[in-house]
Amino acid sequence: MPVLATVLGHPRIGIARELKKALEAYWSGASPAESLMATAQEIRTRHWSMMKQAGLDQIPCNDFSLYDHMLDMAVTVGAIPARFRSIADPLNRYFAMARGVQDRGAGIDLSPLEMTKWFDTNYHYIVPELSADQSFALDPTKIAAELAEAQALGIVPRPVLPGPITFLKLSKFADNVSGMDTLDLLPRLLPVYEELLALLSGHGVTWLQLDEPCLCFDLDPRTAEAYRTALGRLAAAAKRPALLVACYFGSIGENLALVADSGCEALHVDLVRAPADLEAVLPALPQTMKLSLGAVDGRNIWRADLEQAHRLVRRAVTTLGSERVMVATSCSLLHVPVDLDAETRLDAELKSWMAFAAQKVAEVRVLADAAGQEQPQGAVFEQAAAALARRRAAAAADNPAVRHRAEQVTESMSRRNTPFAERSARQKSRFDLPLLPTTTIGSFPQSKEVREARSKWRSGALDGQGYQDFLRAEIRRCIERQEQLGLDVLVHGEFERTDMVEYFGEQLDGFAFTQNGWVQSYGSRCVKPPVLYGDVARPRPMTVEWSSYAQSLSKRPVKGMLTGPVTILQWSFVRNDQPRSQTCRQIALALRDEVADLEQAGIAMIQVDEPAIREGLPLRRRDWDEYLEWAVASFCIATAGVSDETQIHTHMCYSEFGDILPAIIAMDADVLSMESSRSRMEPLEHFRQHGYPNDVGPGIYDIHSPRVPTVEEMTTLLQLAAEVLPVERLWVNPDCGLKTRGWPEIEASLANMVRAALEVRARL
Ligand code: GLN
Ligand code: ZN
């Protein structure tokens, strides 16, 4: 029997971001629901046909989503929070849960469900919101419709569902529930899964994929037990398809037995993230189970090392027999762009090293086909090997100076000259700022004019000088407005940047950019991560000109503004031929030079943003220390080269700080800002508990909403903060950058923010 080829899921957004456009047209009222549905169906049909044509044996279905797969599952099991139940139209209700509804005139204001990052990716899922008396009821509308659609096309679909434990673990209770664990709801949830299994089986489904990436976490005994119960019960269901339990984004490790003993028919493991899992799994898998090998990387854009992957497949086939082996991508292809063939401007050599979703589907097929051969033969294997050899040779010869320098990094390079207390005293006398100094996080509106000027410049309609003059005028206006508002520490506004990672990627050696390499971030939002393929070097200063110009316009300090090494790493597709730590260090060294140049140019405060440090945290605790060590060291290498009088700021956006605070302390930024208005200063409590020693700027203005916060609200938040940390170490700022907001609301909000600071100062 041949080895089966499959993938765990496909991108949904479409090669030309058709789904994004259709969604946004529908939301704005420009087009009716029917056109959105038609586009969605077209996208599904196209992807299914592509996968069928590529010869996949099992094709994912129900992996498509109009917004998010966790939200879909919440709807499928009837977990609709009470506030949305009065919305009769299912589509309106669905989007209301995702995005909220606000109609001031009608007095309607429904806040959406929360959104958060999907494991260690930059994809955000909707967090199902459950109540203490939660009941579940099956609504199979979506999955049944997509199944019928796929079957009508003559394909053999394998529906995908978030498994019950991952679903519950990633859900949360509404605010008013305390003392309960979402797993308490498992007995109520399982009957709905059983009902769904029976229904799918009745519709001719032979295989079902249950996504259980939570199997890659360290599980507490309670969760492990829940796995035993849930998988055991579903496996015992009278009428059901065969079950593939998919574990990805890490190692299944000691959780293996939870699946192996369950009675389910197949296990999927992620051999890209956890190659060692194979040897652990092979002897432990019962005769009745198949193994799906996640051998092709679903998280990155490199062409597979087919020979190496083939060795894994052979190892599995010779041990288990071909009838028990499937070849797959490591995880869903959701995290990579659709088709490399659409890239017409990429360097041909670089392109030959890469693979997007369509190419990965083909790789899976080739690997499955070659499973019977001891030595794989054929043009595909030869081409892959040749591309890999060229890539290795190019890497080896890339930039010896950069590599040499990275090897020479000494411990002292990541340490400031003196402890914070001393630096802080010098900085205080240099800047002479009031208590509770006011500032912003960096960006000001990327208005229509700014985007138009940039696109004119890119297309050649505006020359370099014209664009530069335009940006200078924007900076000048921005500085004037901040002075008028009475802010103490200013920023230049980041008008020259489309995106905080792309801008630096474009200036650095070692990065390339795609035309269509879009990846869904959330809902209709996509990002186009740069491709970090080579040694990273900085041919010339990247921001000095803008920052110096901005500083020349004001006597108040203007912060230099950089994106940190870990965030650049985390939000790019990075090379997989060396450890991430090494790549990160190269970025850090390039940034260190930029920091030095800014300092040299008289920029006295430099902010290095690291919103993605927390996101990059490995799933397993045993891997945390190693990661945090190099991540923090990279930040420090970038920032610690300055004199005592230069003040280093960082912004960490929304991060859960609790369990990583020692690492945050080790970053030793003079000032750390973050989001905290919605959680009402909650992060500060952790700072106090861990004795965080440096300055902190907890956000007091929620920038995710167009609402103008009142002076009173903000003084309350400031006072809350001052009860937790000494007021001498507090700064006053919004939650995050202001690039998505409009000027009128910003001016009103910042005026209130400054007033709030004045009021609290006056009371001290
Ligand atoms: N300096 C950036 C800005 O203001 C920070 C963005 C972020 O935290 N993601 O836009
Ligand atoms: Zn932020």
Image (tube, rainbow, N blue to C red):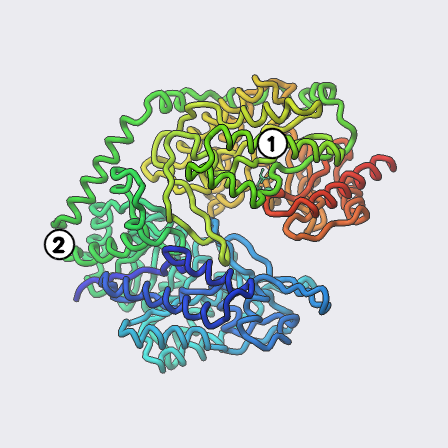
Instruction: Look at discs 2 and 1 and give the one toward the viewer.
Output: 1
Q: Residues within 10 Å of mark 2 (few under 14, many from 20)?
A: few
Please provide percent x and percent y for residue 467.
51, 33
- Is residue 280 among the parts visible in the rendering? no
Badge 1 amino acid: Ala
Of residue 361 and residue 409, the one placed in the foreground of this image is: 361
Q: Quadrant of residue 547?
A: top right
Work out how far the residue at label 2 is from the one at label 1, CA to CA, in angstroms.
66 Å
Of residue 257 and residue 346, the one placed in the foreground of this image is: 346
Q: Quadrant of residue 762?
A: top right
Q: Residues within 10 Å of mark 1 (few under 14, many from 20)?
A: few
**Residue at 46% of width from left, 52% of height from top?**
526
Residue 600 position (above or below residue 484):
above
Residue 530 position (above or below residue 535):
below
Q: Quadrant of the N terminus?
A: bottom left
Q: Secondary structure at mark 2?
A: loop
For this orientation, the residue located farthest to the front is 461
Quick check: is the Cβ at mark 2 less than 8 Å away from ligand 1?
no
**Residue at 69% of width from left, 44% of height from top?**
746
Of residue 172 and residue 644, the one placed in the foreground of this image is: 644
Badge 2 amino acid: Gln
Please provide percent x and percent y for residue 58.
28, 66
**Residue at 37% of width from left, 49% of height from top?**
516
Whereabouts is ligand 2, in terms of quadrant?
top right
Disc 2, disc 1: CB below 8 Å? no
Q: Secondary structure at mark 1?
A: helix
Q: Which residue is mark 1?
A: 473
Q: Which residue is mark 2?
A: 373
**Residue at 40% of width from left, 31% of height from top?**
582
Q: Relative to 725, is 641 on the left or the right? A: left
